[in-house]
Image (cartoon, rainbow, N blue to C red):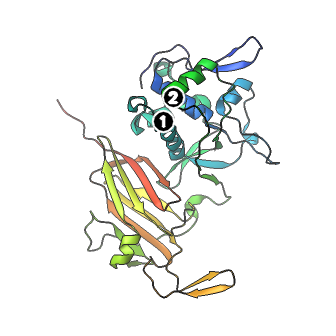
Amino acid sequence: MSGTGREPVFAEKSEQEKVLISLDTEDDKLFLLHFIIGNYFGPHLHDDDGNKRKQSAFQIQASSNLPTKEELSASLMKRAELERVYYYVLRNADPSLVFNRKVLSRYFNEKRKASNVDFPLFRDLYPFKLHPESRIRNQYKLIKSIVFINDPDTSCMREDCVDRFKLLTGLQSFTLSLNIDVTEVDDEPLETLGTCLEGGPGNHDESEPTLEANGVIIADAQAAQMMGLMDIGECADAYLFRVSLPGVKRDERHFSCEVEDNGRVLVRGVTTTGEKQVHRYSQVFKMKTHNLCPPGQFSVSFHLPGPVHPQEFTGSFGTDGIFEGTVMKKLQKQTV
């Protein structure tokens, strides 16, 4: 991450003594990243009556009324969701203004120190003590007590910052039509909920997906076409994969995706399709065909083309039944 600037974020008072937030960085990419994360997200405060308007991180900074742990909800948000909003906002921007996932990871992970004092960081807006990061097994990175704001109030921002954002993105409206997954924390740890089957390669080619349902490897062509259909892509430093999972529960207590160092990917979950009978209100339908994956626990396993860094894996399960994941490659060090 590179850029120049004196202080990445500061508040100043206008003639009406209203505190305004300014992003004093000359690097347009850093400016856009911090503007998006600070305006489209904010601390997830308790809202007992349901009438409070969500406040962005920048609004709270401008008010100088930082929340306490007791005022924050216990919700969890996947870090991949923040990245998704970032890329969505910049979908029509010049590609040279968009960071790749490797640099985004640095923005989220780095701590404030002397060498990066001029650069805005995620933890400037969301202190670790209030918004700790955790994992479910080896799956998603989850951040506590953060909420998505699809129509942010930017009146706390200095006017030239707002104009700069609009010029760089081409957006005139700040409203987004996106749904973001937020998980409420249960008393029982998510790691201990549910029991999933361990899929094995058996006699199958490990380059192809192996589908296992209720302990039986599915070889039927029609079922395989519907469940576990997969695409893999790559760039210079990462792999991307998409897996078709129709009828699979998206609840993280029943669904998991684990990535190993050698590039093996194991997706496990529960399907709700393939029943012999389907109950809809007072009607009972006896199914005449059974082409979908049978109900119950399943696993899909396959191998990426090369070794990876499992700790740099992010995934997102869309409502369209497609699970998408990206993971950084484990690149060999070049020797001179």
Q: Quadrant of the N terminus?
A: top left
Q: Is residue 218 visible?
A: no
Q: Which quarter of the picture shows residue 69? A: top right
> What's the residue type where badge 2 is placed?
Leu
Q: Is residue 154 left or right of residue 113?
A: right
| Residue for point 54% across, 66% down | 249
Using the rendered view, name the quadrant where residue 155 is placed.
top right
Helix or strand or loop: what does disc 1 sit on? Answer: loop
Mark 2 crowd level (few <14, some 14–19, many ≥20, 10 Å Cα):
many
Q: Which residue is under mark 1? A: 90
Q: Position of residue 123 (x, y in %)?
A: 57, 31
Q: Position of residue 334 (x, y in %)?
A: 21, 34
* Residue type beneath disc 1: Leu
Residue at 54 percent across and 22 percent down: it is 164
- Tag 1: Cα neighbours inside 10 Å, few (<14), some, or many (≥20)? some
Q: Nearer the viewer, residue 102 or 159?
A: 159
Q: Report whether 19 appears left or right of 168.
A: right
N-terminal of the pair, mark 2 or mark 1, is 2
| Image position, residue 141 (x, y; %) | 51, 47
* Residue under the point 80% across and 45% down: 51
Lateral position of residue 51 relative to residue 295, left or right: right
Q: Quadrant of residue 38?
A: top right
What is the number of the mark on residue 32?
2
User: Are the residues tagged 2 and 1 within 8 Å (C-beta)?
Assistant: yes
Q: Look at discs 2 and 1 and give the one toward the viewer.
A: 1
